[in-house]
Image: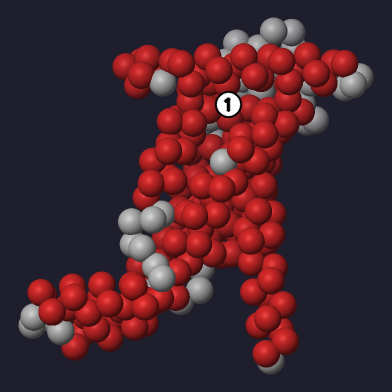
Amino acid sequence: MEFLASLFHPVIAVIQFLLENLYNFTGIIGVQNYGLAIILLTIVIKACLYPLTVKQVRSMKGMQELQPKMKKLQEKYKDNPQLMQQKLGELYREAGVNPLAGCLPLLIQMPILMGMFYALQGYEYSGTPSFLWLTSLSEPDPIYVLPALSALSTWLVQKQTSTEMNQQMKIMMIVMPIFIGWISLTFASGLVLYWVTMNLVQIVQQWWMYRGEDKKKKGGT
């Protein structure tokens, strides 16, 4: 863990610098609080990463929508792997989908996500880091509200982007939120607050991305 933290030290330093400045900003507006500073920091980061989020989400959704056609091709050409790959490539080109398009944005975001983890999990807050019902953002949520919200918001993010789902994806829709909620029980409240805020911002961003498509679907029914 210490080795990984050292790898992301530059990112951690920047994040903690921004957190302290946002904390001072909340003081200027008369509501000085680390919890609010974490929320503002998450919104700023998600806003900066929005172009990458668009590419990642659209790639994922495009691949999900192609799942039925991909399954048919895999069944039809299961005895000829080379031809199957050729047909799948043609399907991707016709649909304008790149299977690898969702990987690059995720790889770019990963250092920031890891930096946020290490920056908030062991952060030494100056003053009393209380927020709403939380007496300390350095400690786990004593009444498990944030872990429950982390699980629920993770499920909503997955639900929003899921269209055609195979059995494996349906299982992940259940397992991933439960896993996130479970590990959140032992994480610092500040870190879980970041995760919940990140998911909520993601939900708003994804709604914004697909608001035009939703109108078209309603108009076509």
Whether residue 206 sits left or right of residue 183 in the image: it is right
**Residue 138: % across, % down:** 61, 20
Q: In which quarter of the image is the C terminus?
A: bottom right
Q: For residue 21, what is the image quadrant?
A: top right
Q: Residue furthest top?
A: 126
**Residue 220: % across, % down:** 67, 90
Q: How many marks?
A: 1
Q: Nearer the viewer, residue 144 or 4?
A: 4
Q: For residue 49, what is the image quadrant?
A: top right
**Residue at screen point 38% across, 41% down:** 107
Q: Residues within 10 Å of mark 1 (few under 14, many from 20)?
A: many
Whether residue 52 sits left or right of residue 69 in the image: it is right
Does 40 appear above or below 33? below
Q: Nearer the viewer, residue 195 or 96?
A: 96
Whether residue 70 sits left or right of residue 13 in the image: it is left
Q: On the image, numbered disc 1 is attached to which residue?
A: 188
**Residue 4: % across, % down:** 35, 21
